[in-house]
Image (cartoon, rainbow, N blue to C red):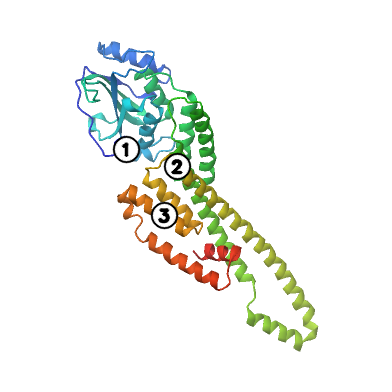
């Protein structure tokens, strides 16, 4: 998949099969639209059906980029449309996907994106940039189901397991929830996507689904959930601090009860009540801290597994380093950061100062341990103060 923005090649009008926006054909099957438009234009260039994927041809798929449409709920972004074409295509080497910069006249009036598919004949050398055989353009593409129908009914690339569509649908819905800062709902959707993807891939069925990418997203969602737990954790610690009397206050209360014995029972009773309240708040702190660490452990597990599935993806190694750093595994975190830089030098700006910050944090932890702090107390103190 090409990431830089390109302009799709100009094509003769008689070669391009223009399909009207989807919302104008709610009652018509997708295949009927093709035949109706082909008959109306008198063209015979529509893609002929074939029982199997044709290896003598390749497809160039151009997806329009529109930031305004990305903001509308229920419409998946163009990056997801591109990923769907790659993930659902039975033979990825026969499909090249590009983000496209459309001319003003070519923009779709519907809510979805415009997709142009160009079919080429492979050259004698096997190159995928041969003669253009046919082309089609579809407007208002805003869902996985529509990508599925383009691939199977238009591009005629063979049957695709419906489970693959279900997986990607959950995956993209999870991305939408994550963008809306709803990590718990996102994790639930990623769980469904991963369950479907593992079952699908284990059956040796094509296409292969992006397990590693989904794991990276779920790890990010767990990190977001951990951050939310830490915010609540800090609030609880602040509330507990406000209820604990200082040493000077205790001294004054003791002197008052000694000077005025009649007030002693009420003073001690109040201290006992405050002590019970403090115990309740401390239990809440321990529970919230456990939830925080639980989310971090899940994030680390997913990110480490992603590096095994995507060993050349620098961002996967970067994410694993971030998760390990949050767990105070700073030496291991630096190793993953260094590997991420080796794979993708462009991450250097994003990681500026991270390695040095890890080194200083490690020195602080060693000093704290030497001073007698250890275990849960040290972790809680570091997580609240971070």
Q: Please identify the quarter of the rendering in which residue 46 is found.
A: top left
Sort mark 2 into few (<14), some (14-19) or many (20+) by Cα contacts within 10 Å. few
Which of 265/278 is in front?
A: 278
Lateral position of residue 276 relative to residue 296, left or right: right
Residue 268: give its label: none
Foreground disc of the pair 1, 2: 2
Foreground disc of the pair 3, 1: 3
Q: Earlier in the sequence, mark 1 or mark 2?
A: 1
Looking at the picture, how far across and down is residue 299, in whole percent?
51, 48
Q: CA–CA distance between discs 2 and 3? A: 15 Å
- Residue at x 65% of width, y 63% of height: 282
- SS of the residue at dot 2? helix
Q: How many marks?
A: 3
Q: Which residue is mark 1?
A: 66
Q: Which residue is mark 2?
A: 308
Residues at badges 1 and 2 in contact (C-beta under 8 Å)? no
């Amino acid at each position: 998949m090409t990431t830089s923005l390109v302009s799709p090649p100009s094509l003769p009008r008689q070669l391009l099969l223009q399909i009207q926006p989807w919302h104008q054909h709610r009652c018509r099957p997708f295949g009927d639209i093709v035949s109706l438009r082909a008959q109306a234009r008198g063209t015979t260039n529509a893609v002929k059906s074939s029982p199997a994927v044709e290896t003598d041809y390749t497809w160039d798929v151009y997806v329009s980029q529109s930031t305004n449409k990305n903001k509308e709920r229920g419409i998946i972004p163009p990056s997801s449309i591109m990923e769907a074409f790659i993930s659902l295509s039975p033979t990825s080497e026969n499909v090249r996907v590009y983000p496209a910069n459309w001319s003003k006249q070519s923009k779709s009036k519907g809510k979805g994106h415009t997709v142009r598919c160009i079919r080429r004949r492979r050259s004698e050398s096997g190159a995928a940039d041969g003669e253009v055989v046919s082309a089609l353009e579809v407007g208002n593409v805003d869902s996985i189901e529509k990508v599925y129908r383009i691939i199977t009914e238009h591009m005629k690339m063979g049957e695709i397991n419906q489970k693959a569509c279900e997986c990607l649908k959950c995956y993209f819905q999870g991305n939408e929830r994550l963008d809306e800062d709803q990590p718990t709902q996102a994790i639930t959707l990623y769980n469904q996507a991963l369950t479907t993807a593992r079952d699908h891939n284990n059956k040796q069925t094509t296409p292969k689904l992006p397990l590693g990418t989904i794991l990276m997203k779920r790890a990010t969602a767990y990190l977001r959930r951990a951050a939310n737990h830490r915010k609540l954790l800090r609030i609880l610690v602040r509330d507990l601090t406000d209820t604990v009397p200082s040493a000077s206050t205790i001294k004054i209360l003791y002197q008052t009860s000694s000077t005025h014995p009649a007030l002693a029972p009420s003073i001690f009773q109040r201290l006992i009540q405050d002590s019970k309240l403090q115990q309740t708040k401390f239990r809440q702190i321990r529970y919230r801290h456990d939830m925080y660490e639980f989310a971090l452990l899940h994030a680390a597990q997913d990110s480490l597994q992603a590096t095994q599935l995507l060993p050349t993806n620098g961002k996967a190694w970067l994410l694993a380093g971030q998760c390990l750093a949050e767990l105070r595994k700073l030496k291991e975190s630096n190793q993953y950061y260094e590997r991420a830089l080796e794979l993708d030098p462009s991450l250097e700006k994003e990681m500026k100062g991270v390695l040095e910050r890890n080194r200083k944090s490690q020195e602080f932890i060693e000093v704290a341990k030497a001073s007698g702090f250890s275990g849960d107390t040290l972790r809680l103190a570091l997580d609240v103060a971070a």
